[in-house]
Amino acid sequence: VQLQASGGGLVQAGGSLRLSCAASGRTFSRYYMGWFRRAPGKERQFVAAIIWSDTTTYYADSVKGRFTISRGYADNTVYLQMNSLKPEDTAVYYCAAKDSERLTYDYWGQGTQVTVSS
């Protein structure tokens, strides 16, 4: 499984960004696709996840109502729409994938930097 994240950048507080994660290497019908982030000096944090087969979504409380995870239907791409961004959202964002029967995410993309200025 290969995951390629893109879409990060610099944005002012209150702005929006959309991250993309292009997935390849297998059929993802049984997979969970997730977004995580790591801010400087902090541990990696769960952001959002989507079940590929039925598009059930999960969110961290800190992003609920501001971020939306979705999947493309024409391609194996997962999106993270981030609105009302705050300086505390500044982090490197990683996409990840796991089989639904696994407890941990086994596959990780390279990360994309998101910086929110105040």
Image (cartoon, rainbow, N blue to C red):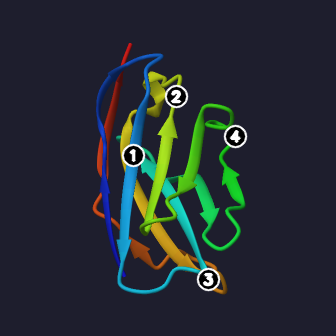
Write the residue at 44% across / 45% down. Answer: 42
- Number of numbered markers: 4
Residue 114's tag is none
Answer with left or right where residue 82 lies relative to residue 102: left
Measured Cα–Cα span from mark 4 to mark 2: 15 Å
Q: Nearer the viewer, residue 27 or 3?
A: 27
Query: Quadrant of the rendered structure where residue 76 is?
Result: bottom left
Please tell me which of labels 2 and 3 falls first in the chain: 3
Mark 1 element type: strand
Write the residue at 54% across / 66% down. Answer: 33
Mark 4 element type: loop
Mark 3 belongs to which amino acid?
Arg
Say which residue label 2 marks. 83
- Name the front one of labels 4 and 1: 1
Residue 85 image offset from top left, x and y in percent:
48, 25
Q: Is residue 109 above or below residue 47?
A: below
Instruction: Say which quadrant the N terminus sits in.
Output: bottom left
Say which residue label 4 marks. 61
